[in-house]
Amino acid sequence: MVHQDLGYVGYFDRESCDLDEFKVLTSQNLLADAVPHAVSVEKNVPIYDMQALRLVLEDVDQRRALLSEWGWVLSKSAGVIVLREAYPDTSVIDRATEVFRQIIDEERQGGAGEGDHFAASGANDRVWNALQKQCLRDPEGFALYFGNTAIAAACEAWLGPNYQVTAQVNQVRPGGKAQQAHRDYHLGFQSADSAARFPAHAHHLTAALTLQGAVAHCDMPVESGPTKLLPFSQLYPSGYLAFHDSAHRDHFEDAYIQLPLAKGDAVFFNPALFHAAGENSSGDIDRMANLLQISSAFGRAMEALDRRAMSQAVFPHLTALKQRGDLGQLELDAAIAATAEGYPFPTNLDTDPPTGGNAPESQADILRRAVSENWTEAQLAETLSALRARQAA
C-alpha cells in the first residue's frame, strides 16, 4: 500500500534521488557566528584551535558547550570539523608513523594488507586493524597517541560515552589515484539495491552510529590529496542510494572542497558526508593518515579486535605514565576508551548479571579500576579472564 497522501516516506528508491535538491542542500554557507568556538571557517568547514581550547575541555560546562557545537555541525550544518594541533607534540605522531611503516613493510613482504575499498588503483598501502597492531607492538606509544583529549572529545560529541575506536592506516605515495565519492559504514558499504531494502528511518539512523576521522601523520598540502569533502551533503535524505549515481558523483567532483592539513591536525566528519580521498599529485609526499572509524556503543564496529589482549598490553604503561605525570586523568580516560570495550553487552545474563545497577561491569570499567587502584598485571589478567568466562558461559 502506498501512503504518499499521508506523508509517509517508507522506503527510498532511485526516484527519491533528486539532483536539484542535492545541489540546493550543498550550496549552503556556514556563518562564523554559528560556531563561536571556531577560530575560522574555511570553505564552509569550521576550524578549531585545540591549543586554545584545551582548558575548555577541562571545564564541565564549557566542554559541554563545545561538544554541543560540534554535534550540531556534524548533524545539522556542514558535517565536518577540523581540529588544528589536535596533537601539539608531533613526536607522538612520528613514533606511531614509524610503527605503521614497519607494519606496512612487513605486510607488503608477506603479501598481506592488499585489500582496500572504494580506491582506484594506485600507489597506496592500507593497514587494517591498525589500532590493535599499534597497541600490541608499542603499547606505551599507543597510550600516548590515544591519551588525547581532543580526539576523545570529538568521539564523545557525536557518539557519547563507551564508543569503540577502530583504525586503518592509509599511505598514498605520489601517483596514488583518488577515490570515488561515497558515504561510509554502515549503509555506505551496501550496494544501492541492498540499501534500498532498509526503511527510510534506518538511513537516518545509520549516520548516528559511527564517526569518521583522520589524523594527519605528515603535512598535507592540497597537491598531496587530502580528503575531498562536500559540506552539507550528509543532510541529503536518500544519499546512501545517490552516491552510486553518476550524476550525483559528477556534482561532487564539481563542488567538493579540500583543506590542507598539518602533521598533528585531525578532521572528523559525519559518515553520511559525501567524501573521497584525493589524488596525490605531489612529487615527493608519502601522504599518511590514520583513518579512525569510531562506533557507537549501540552499534557494531567494522573490525573485530582482541581488546582483552590490548588492555593487558597497555595496562602497565598506563600505570607508569600516570605515575610519571605524563598522562593526567582525562588523558588516561581517553586512552582507556580507545583500548577496552566500554559497553558490557552482549553478555550472558545468567552468569554475568547486573549488580548494583542495570548493567554489569564492562572491560573498560575493570581497566580503569586497575589503573586507579594500582593492580598488578596478574590481577588484571585474572579479572579480565573471569569476565570473558562469565560473558561466554
Image: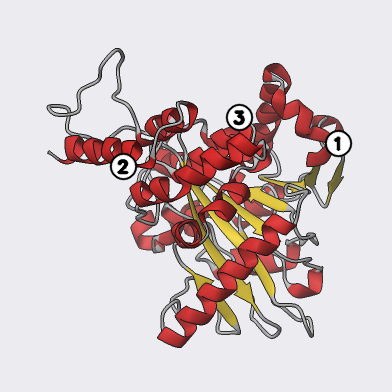
The numbered mark, 2 or 3, whose residue comes first in the sequence reads 3
Q: Nearer the viewer, residue 297 or 334?
A: 334
Picture coordinates of residue 292, whole percent (x, y): 55, 54
In the picture, residue 226 is in which quadrant? Answer: bottom right
Image quadrant in which you'd find residue 77: top right
Q: For the point 78% across and 83% down, which residue is it?
A: 284
Point out which mark residue 329 bears: 3
State the mark number for residue 32: 1
Mark 2 to mark 3: distance in Å? 22 Å
Q: Amino acid at mark 2?
A: Ala
Residue type for callout 1 = Ala
> Mark 2 touching mark 3, by CB under 8 A?
no
Q: Earlier in the sequence, mark 3 or mark 1?
A: 1
Disc 2 element = helix
Tag 1's secondary structure? helix
Q: Residue 7 appears at what percent x and percent y?
A: 45, 32
The quarter of the rendered structure image containing the C terminus is top left
Mark 2 surroundings: few (<14), some (14-19) or many (≥20) residues within 10 A = some
